[in-house]
Image: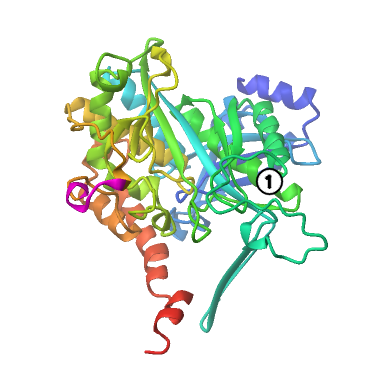
Amino acid sequence: MSPKEVLKFVEENNIKIVDLRFMDFIGLWQHCSYPAHELTEDVFEDGMGFDGSSLRGWQAINNSDMILIPDPASAKVDPFTEIPTLILICNVFDPITKEPYTRDPRYIAKKAQNYLKGTGLADTAFFGPEAEFFIFDDIRYGYSANSGFFYFDSEEGNWNSGADRGPNLGYKIRHKEGYFPCPPHDTLMGLRSEMTTLMEEMDIIVEAHHHEVATGGQCEIDIKYAPLLEQGDNLLLYKYIVKNVARKHNKTATFMPKPMYGDNGSGMHVHQSLWKDGKPLFAGDEYGGLSEMALYYVGGIIKHARALAAFTNPTTNSYKRLVPGFEAPVNLAYSSRNRSASLRIPMYDSSPKAKRIEVRFPDPSCNSYLAFTAMLMAGLDGIENKIDPGDPMDKNLYDLDPIELSNVPQMPASLDEALDELEKDHEFLLKGDVFTEDVISTWIEYKRENEANEINMRPHPYEFMLYFDF
């Protein structure tokens, strides 16, 4: 819609509240709500002011004024509010220079799309994320100087097989057996269907939903591929819908990569392909039916994967999932059909339009705009520099002997390590001014000081199990 069409839609649909939303630097959706009469055509040009110093990783207090300019094409009716509310996703601008704010993740994604077109290699990058998440019935956590704990529960968790719940009806999902039995084992089918219906009503095309491998409520909803910026928006709506449908049913949803010990964590496999003039560029006669361009793209992802991890796996908890030896996508190799490799070439469909690569190491805690953009820039670097991805690995990488496995590069083992890698390897992200040195350094500084260091300084409850009696 154009600004005029948005205003007409507001009037015709009796919209009372307009909710302006934007992505903060770290990866959480923010919003501010206005009576509908405050939305005028001028707002689409001049924006609405807010305090940028109150957001993590953004402005200093002496430089706090920022403005939000809504994107009229993003208009969606909020399905959860009692009072009719229109969601508008915004871009962030500096009120003095009137320039886009360089730390706005959505602006970084827009610059990546423009850079792609400027290379002449392609005009569209499609992304298809498969985000996994857990739905729990209860969650509690706390930390103080003399205590620390977390507790969660799920009615379908295997640990509840002996619970006295008057009555306990059984049908608990055993560890690693959640993929994917029918109800009554799968207690969340109805919730996922409700989530799916709302996503489709908000123009997000859903391909499938199902229970995932882990006990205790692990789920997945797959959405159809879309261009980078649009898919970044979609993933925020996706998370918003998942969390609010769960809350509506007195449950809670988390996209934390590894909330549960002893079972699968939540990943976000990301399918990717490049197109030009409406034609797919990743189909060809090379390995797995890929084109030479696609293999070079793979080469770029593998070369820069350890630095990419700072954006695709950006939490300390991400590395509780990325653990060698536990069927996690830590081995930086590619293969067709082989899910033990960190890059897979799906072989379900022989159509050139379906030819794509699947990057398996990202997780859903990421900032979608930054993660998608970083992967695109790595892939483009591979194409531009003709980076050879090496030979494919068609064997089960989890069964390799230690000597053979030592020749396969691995993902970082911690957020600290990923940030070190990004510090050393980020020139490819600076091309076309897509990322800036300020964005990279601010990301590294924030993550080190506010997350990695905070975890490193605190005793872990299991350390008492290991060491208290020394």
Q: Estimate how packed mark 1 is, as few (under 14), some (14 to 19) or many (20 or more) residues with alpha carbons within 10 Å.
A: some
Residue 305, quarter of the rendered image:
top left
Q: Position of residue 338 (x, y in %)?
A: 35, 34
Q: Position of residue 285 (x, y in %)?
A: 26, 14
Under mark 1, the amino acid is His
Asked whether, in this view, residue 121 is left or right of residue 385, the answer is right
Q: Quadrant of the C terminus?
A: bottom left
Asked whether, in this view, residue 186 is left or right of residue 30, the answer is right
**Secondary structure mainly formed by the magenta segment:** helix
Q: Residue at x 60, y 20 (%)?
A: 2
Asked whether, in this view, residue 180 is left or right of residue 302, the answer is right
**Residue 462 drawn above or below residue 426:** below
Residue 44 visible: yes
Q: Residue at x 36, y 53 (%)?
A: 443
Q: Residue at x 52, y 50 (%)?
A: 176
Residue 414, quarter of the rendered image:
bottom left
Q: Quadrant of the N terminus?
A: top right
**Residue 463 drawn above or below residue 430:** below
Residue 460 visible: no
Q: Position of residue 220 (x, y in %)?
A: 57, 39
Q: Position of residue 202 (x, y in %)?
A: 65, 28
Q: Residue at x 42, y 30 (%)?
A: 271
Which residues fall within the magenta stretch?
399-405
Q: Is 202 one of the magenta-colored residues?
A: no
| Foreground residue among 76 and 244 | 244
- List the residue tagged with mark 1: 185
